[in-house]
Amino acid sequence: MIEYILPLSMVGVLILGIMSGYPVALVLAGVGILFTFIGDVPLVFLNTISSRIFTGSLTNWLLLAVPLFVFMGLMLEKSNIAKNLLLSLERLFAQRPGGLALSVTIVGVVMAASTGIIGASVVMLGLMALPVMLKQQYSMRLAAGTICSAGTLGILIPPSIMLVLVGDILQISIGDLFMGAVVPGLILGGLYALYILVVAHLNPSLAPPAELQEKVSTLQAIGVLVKHLFAPVILILGVLGSIVAGVATPTEAAAIGAAGATLLAALMGQLTWQNLVDCVRETSLTTAMILTVAIGATVFSGIFKRVGGDTMIEDAVFSIASGPYQTLFLIMALIFVLGFFLEWIEISYVVLPLFAPIIAGLDFGLGHSGITLTWFAVLVAVNLQTSFLTPPFGYALFYLRGIAPPGLGINDIYIGIIPFVLIQLLGLGLCILFPSLVLGLPEMLRN
């Protein structure tokens, strides 16, 4: 135990630094530099870390996809496509219990394939749907849980900036990750919808049907829905299809998506100078935040491994877990708990480099280590989605609280999200029990 005093101390100081309220990126880098001196690490080792930062982050062509996908999502959010989709779905499902909540979930799935910006998605859905749901006498808790869960699907369903970063960290195919996350993302969306329908059937007072002022036929409602779905579906197919077909790299596909989203905004009459400036500013801030965390995490993980942290993690895992699935369960449990306190970016950059070699060396009967890591990466992505929903620091909860009316308290949001977190854990369990849910689509397309 005495040989692990330095890495244990690094973890303890990191937790204290995060709880102090300082920016996580600065805490990560500061703790790394502090323990460079405490651990008597040669200063020349920091030159190695600087080279790793430069080649791994600042000049990494793949990471250029991050600001392009962020810009694509923000521009689509400005184009009012989601608003039109929600209105058309509301007309289609309005007269059945839970219809509006079901509409919000479907819009969340569609927009998840267009934008990976959780804050924008939750705020957008909250501003559009929450007042209407409360006006229809929806349960506040059901409304809050539906909006938060649907808004977080964008971090999992491709094209997702989380998958881009995870793929870069683990050095595995982004195209395989994108295809591997499609089915789990749709399963989660389907489970959300099933839960809403069951709750509305058992207790219609929690999600009463709406009364439309103008009557429209089902055929007319479907026609309007198809019209509003056409543009985003073509854009999504263009981005993902170009990656799957091998026509474009993820970075080039992201550029196609950014250009396509800008064109759609122009066709919808929303490409104003102010909207363009807002999108560029938000893209810059989000990208700067991600890269700053990446730099800080590189410093921390480099020093952590130097003082024996990777050996400590490996010994701890194998002393508790005796088999591949026990080890996987332990890692998934740890990531889930970390999601209560950290963002997915910090978890990805700090935890994945430590656990990936352990998983790659285990035999799950899936084939070579690349396939195993692809499966593991998607499992981690499903797990990390819960980090946006779990209190006390679930960001989706605070995004919704920031735009919610005074009657919707944070306690209602916390309680309302519990069933959806359990649904996510169910989805994670299915992906662990049936790896083909993750690996089937990439394998089919590869063949």
Image: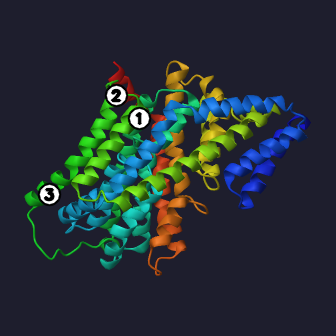
Q: Residue 255: x and y, percent? A: 37, 38
Task: Label 3, secondary structure: give it.
Answer: helix
Circle 3 sits on which residue?
A: 224
Residue shown at 51% from the left, 27% from the top:
172
Q: Is residue 111 left or right of residue 394?
A: left
Q: CA distance from mark 1 to mark 3?
A: 29 Å
Q: Residue 271: x and y, percent? A: 30, 56
Q: Amino acid at mark 1?
A: Phe
Residue shown at 35% from the left, 24% from the top:
246
Mark 1 crowd level (few <14, some 14–19, many ≥20, 10 Å Cα) = many
Q: Amino acid at mark 3?
A: Val
Above/below status of 162 relative to 445: below
Q: Amino acid at mark 2?
A: Val
Q: In this view of the protein, which residue sits in the foreground, 403 or 354?
A: 403
Q: Is residue 214 left or right of residue 169?
A: left
Q: Residue 217: x and y, percent? A: 8, 63
Circle 2 sits on which residue?
A: 244
Task: Report the number of discs.
Answer: 3
- Residue ranking furthest to the bottom: 407
Q: In this view of the protein, which residue sits in the foreground, 43 or 379?
A: 43
Mark 3 crowd level (few <14, some 14–19, many ≥20, 10 Å Cα) = some
C-beta proximity under 8 Å, tags 1 and 2: yes
Task: Label 2, secondary structure: give it.
Answer: helix
* Residue 178 badge: 1
Does residue 169 appear in this view? yes
